[in-house]
Amino acid sequence: MHNVRLALLAAAGLSLALTACNQKKEETATTGDNGATTTEANAAAPAADQNDPVASAMSAAPESIAKGATVVQAQADGSMKVIRQGSNGWTCMPDSPTTPGPDPMCMDANAAKWAQAWIGHKDPPANTVGVMYMLEGGTDASNTDPYAQKPTSENDWVNTGPHIMVVGSKDVLAGYPSGAKPDTAAPYVMWAGTPYAHLMIPVAKI
């Protein structure tokens, strides 16, 4: 998990740095006469190819997002390499080999701010709701401890299927269960009672 955190921090910083230039491109992009996203644009993302970092990263989100996202990959020295420059303000990362399951992810700019705060042990910015897609699923060392580096005898890996993470909002968490061993087939709160509590929402891969 330590290596995953370093990768997220680098990706978050890079995402924020790219936001300004991506925003201008995003403003000039067209989506249709009424601005609505079409069914075709929401077609399923391609199956992940773990030998292709771009394909792996793109599998984390719907094609309508993934096709315009910047793709970054963690290097051995902890730095982040831009594999493909994007234009829509989203940043995607391929699967991390340091975890037991596939976990590519895509985050918007607000989620990048949240991730940067988490890694830096700082409070996330208030009222800054962000979204992360993990349509290939994921694995976490703990559902209660944001800084757990490995599971304990009482707390095994939390394995999740395809899901969306809503971060940066306390209000959205109300009424959802939490705990060390959540039912990952239904929405639940990860890291409840910490500044990094967020909603995990299982979804079918779309």
Image: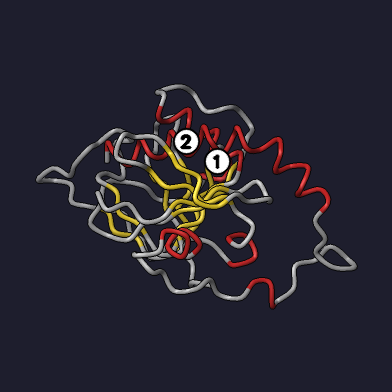
The residue where tag 2 is placed is 115
**Tags 2 and 1 touching, CB below 8 Å:** yes
Q: Residue at x 53, y 61 (%)?
A: 61
Compared to residue 172, the image places residue 116 above or below, namely above
- Closer to us: 127 or 97: 97
In the image, is 179 to the left or to the right of 205?
Answer: left
Q: How is the image coloured?
A: secondary structure
Neighbor class of circle 2 (other Cα within 10 Å; few <14, some 14-19, many 20+) is many
SS for callout 1: helix
Q: Residue furthest left?
A: 153
Q: Residue furthest right?
A: 33
Q: Residue at x 32, y 52 (%)?
A: 96
Q: Which quadrant holds residue 121?
A: top left
Q: Amino acid at mark 1?
A: Ala
Question: x and y percent of residue 56 in the render?
Answer: 42, 62
Q: Which quadrant holds residue 19?
A: top right
Q: Amino acid at mark 2?
A: Ala
In the image, is 139 to the left or to the right of 81?
Answer: left
The residue where tag 1 is placed is 111
